[in-house]
Structures are given as C-alpha cells and as structure tokens.
Amino acid sequence: MEKISRTKIVDLLKRRDFGAMVNVKGWVRTRRGSKQVNFIALNDGSTINNVQIVVDLANFDEEMLKQITTGACISVNGELTESIGSGQAAEIQAREIEVLGTCDNTYPLQKKGHTMEFLREIAHLRPRTNTFGAVFRIRHNMAIAIHKFFHERGFFYFHTPIITASDCEGAGQMFQVTTKNLYDLKKDENGAIIYEDDFFGKQASLTVSGQLEGELAATALGAIYTFGPTFRAENSNTPRHLAEFWMIEPEVAFNDITDNMDLAEDFIKYCVRWALDNCYDDVKFLNDMFDKGLIERLQGVLKEDFVRLPYTEGIKILEEAVAKGHKFEFPVYWGVDLASEHERYLVEDHFKRPVILTDYPKEIKAFYMKQNEDGKTVRAMDVLFPKIGEIIGGSEREADYDKLMTRIQELEIPMKDMWWYLDTRKFGSCPHSGFGLGFERLLLFVTGMTNIRDVIPFPRTPRNAEF
Ligand code: 4AD
Ligand code: MG
C-alpha cells in the first residue's frame, strides 16, 4: 500500500480540499450497501463523528473485503470527496484498503442499544462505543480545563502523596498498604498488630485526601491545587460513590470562607463553560441520546448565581417541607448529616439552582474546620448540584493552634500522625481556605450520565476491581 501520512478523522472532516489523496486508520462501526458499492462508517476515536468510506467492490479483492466486519481495524488510502449522503461534508472514495486487524465474530459490540450494566461488564471494550468515546473525551477536556483555570490564576500544581499515615477526613475509611505476610501477623500482648517491621515502619494507607499536605504548600507558595487519585473504603454502593476517585483540591492562604465560595463558583462555571465551548459535539450527542435537558442544565448553571445559605436555614426549609407533607426516606433535624435526597430537594425543588450550604454542625464535619463563635458550628461549605447532590466539600481552616489542638484532643486523633500539620499553626499561621471537587461528580453533571461507574474508565467499587 502506498505510504500516505495519516489524517485523524476529526481533522479530515473539516477539510475541503476535495481531490486530495488521504489516509485514515480506524475501527469499522458499520458496513452496508449493495452488490456494487459498500459504505463503511469508520471511527478512530478522535471525534464522535465517523467518516464514510465508499468502496467500489469491483476494484478490491473479495477475500480482503470479507474481513471488513464490525470492529475490524483498517487503513484506507483514498480520495477526499464532497459527500451528499453521509451526514458529513467530506467522505473518502477508497483506492487501497489494508486490514490491520480482523475482528473475531464473538465481538460483543455488534449491535447498538446495549445496556449500561452490560457495557460495564465489558469495560475493556466500551471506550469503542459512541457513548463512552464521548464521555472519555469530555473527561480529558475537563482535566485540561482544570489545569488551565488554576494556572491562569497563578496557582501551583502540587503533588501530595498517595501513600500516607494520616486520615485527613478522620472517617476511618482507608485502604491499608502493607508488605506484611498476612498469613503470619505478629501481634503484641494486647493483640494489636506490630507494624515496626512493616515496609514504612508504621501503619500506612492510601490517601483519602491531599488536603493536609496541600495546606503545608498553601502556607508556603500561597495558592496551590492538587489533582490526583484518592481512595475510600466506604461500603456505599450508590450511583455517586467510588472506592477510587479523582479529586481536585485548591488551598489558598489568606482566603476566608467567602473567597472560598467565590473561587468554587468561578471554578465550576469555568469547567462547565469549557465543556460547552470545547466538547459541543460530544455533549450534544449525550444530550440527544440520553438526557434532553442536559445542555439546558449546563447553560442554566452559567446564568445563575449560586444560593449561599447557612445549614441552619437549610434545615428550616427541609422541616417546612416535611410539615407540608413532603416525604423523605431519612429524618430531618438540626444536627443531621444531610442525605442526598435532602440536598437535592433544596437544589431541585426549592431553589432550582445550585446551593452552597455553610456553617454546618461541628459534629458532622472534620477536625480542621474553623470554629464559629457559637461553639456549635464550623465554617464549612458544601456545594450542592442538581441531579448530583454534593459536588464540592470545603471550609475555611482553623488557623488557631490552641483551638485546633483542643479539637484534635476531643476527637482523640492520634497526635503522632499530626505533628507536622500542627507546625503550620506554630510557624507563621495564617487564615486559609480550600475545598475538594470530586472529579467524577463534575463529570456526572457535565455528561448527564446517571451512574458514577460510567464516567471513569475502570471503576473500583465494593466487590469490583475487574480490568
Ligand atoms: O467532602 P470531602 O470528603 O472533602 C474532603 O476530602 C476535603 N479534604 C476536601 C478539602 O477541603 N480539600 O470530599 C470532597 C469531594 C466531595 O464533595 C465529592 O464530590 C467527592 O469529593 N467525593 C467522592 N466522589 C466519588 N466517590 C466517593 N466515594 C467520594 N467521596 C467524596
Ligand atoms: Mg463532604
């Protein structure tokens, strides 16, 4: 076959230099036609759109043509021509075709309309579907948007460790990391496992959050963000929880809770706008295919200011709803950790736009949050989104050494893990704030997918670590 340098289909479909000889490579989506002429829809992953290859059967070897089945990988040399029937402006009149990889007839993506559940079972192949191609291109674009947003604002990308000995959120949902022989665990006289001889000389785990190390950096570099994988061994089998997910955590010296809310709102709006501006074909596909309200929802978020409301006011609204006969599965009272149904009631039924809920009871929030004068609440902020519930969790941090220390003692957090964190409050402490955005929760919002397992390539959930 003549050597012509390859054009990606995304670029090819924009070309209008009809008559040019081009090469494309990709996977066959469909093949149809008559005894004389066949039409191959070819996709190479660079765009949701296929290029149509027109094949005049008389010009090609019959045995080679037989191998061009759904899923096969082919390389095509041909003439770029103006198209009338393909739905695209350009198509290719094939001159030479090489089959790079034939496709076994057990290929599970023969027909359209597979369920999401089935596609999860073939997660190694689902990126070849239109839906997952769109989702993963959007995922890439959101990652780029995030780096751009922070870089443009002078934030530094800071790498916090994946393996850690401290439980940032204090929820005890950590996966252990060990090289110990689990069949022969040495224990002390109280039955506790001895870790001195383990790899790190102490008990270590996968991180649930980069925040504590992020605070060290913010009080040195001024403004930083992390963007990395985090791990939580919470046994919640919900459409919004993963055991391994990616989190973005900005942390900013001298920001108070209001600055923190402004940053969160700007940040999410920037990402949503980026999706509409840079991934329109993919977003439009998902809108038309699954969720006719998606684009409208994305545009809606850009138009409106987020509601900012103290937790106590939020509880009042929920209690009034209950009094008027609204049924929630879980009880509503001051002090309760809000369930997703409560968050979504505030956002979708009451305010009909995103809500930032602040000043939560200290009992349901982490030790590091700045304590309010009332002695009951902390300067927390959760950003609540339509269809999602909590998308961001953050706070102003407690900058006062004594107050922080008292809280650590009340919660009986082992100090041996915390000395380095407390040093920030001893050596030039300053007001500072930050938050964590769940990357996959953002993707749920932007793609309109309804299950978090469908916005990460290989989901990790309880009893599932295939692929
Ligand atoms: O609210 P969280 O637990 O906050 C923190 O980890 C703080 N250290 C963040 C900070 O202030 N720097 O988690 C932050 C976000 C949640 O709002 C949610 O979007 C996401 O992370 N998240 C999850 N996403 C998927 N699966 C899970 N199991 C998640 N747990 C939290
Ligand atoms: Mg939270």
Image (spheres, grey):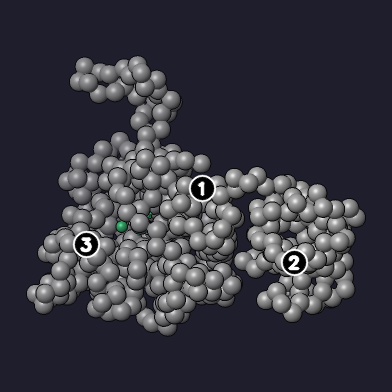
Neighbourhood count class around disc 3 (C-alpha, 10 Å): few under 14, some 14–19, many 20 upward? many
The picture quadrant where one finds residue 350 is bottom left
At label 2, the amino acid type is: Ser
Reading the chain from its start, which is encountered first: label 3 or label 2? 2
Residue 338 image label:
3
Reading the chain from its start, which is encountered first: label 3 or label 1? 1
Q: Is residue 152 left or right of residue 264?
A: right
Residue 263 in the image, given as x and y percentages of width and height: 42, 70
Res. 59 in view: yes
Give ligand 2's quarter of the image: bottom left
Circle 1 is placed at which residue position? 122
At label 1, the amino acid type is: Ile
Q: CA distance from mark 3 to mark 1?
A: 35 Å
At a point 26% along the width and 77% down the height, the residue shown is 349
Task: Please tell me whether mark 2 sits on a helix, a strand or a loop.
Answer: loop
Circle 2 is placed at which residue position? 34
Q: Is residue 284 above or below residue 392?
A: below
Q: CA distance from mark 3 to mark 2?
A: 61 Å
At a point 20% along the width and 41% down the height, the residue shown is 412
Q: Is residue 458 left or right of residue 400?
A: right
The mark lying in front, picked from 3 and 2, is 2
Residue 355 image label:
none
**Are the residues flagged by discs 3 and 1 in contact, CB closer than 8 Å?**
no
Res. 269 in view: no
Q: Is mark 2 within 8 Å of ligand 1?
A: no
**Are the residues flagged by discs 3 and 2 in contact, CB closer than 8 Å?**
no
Q: Is residue 227 left or right of residue 12?
A: left
The picture quadrant where one finds residue 323 is bottom left
Reading the chain from its start, which is encountered first: label 2 or label 1? 2
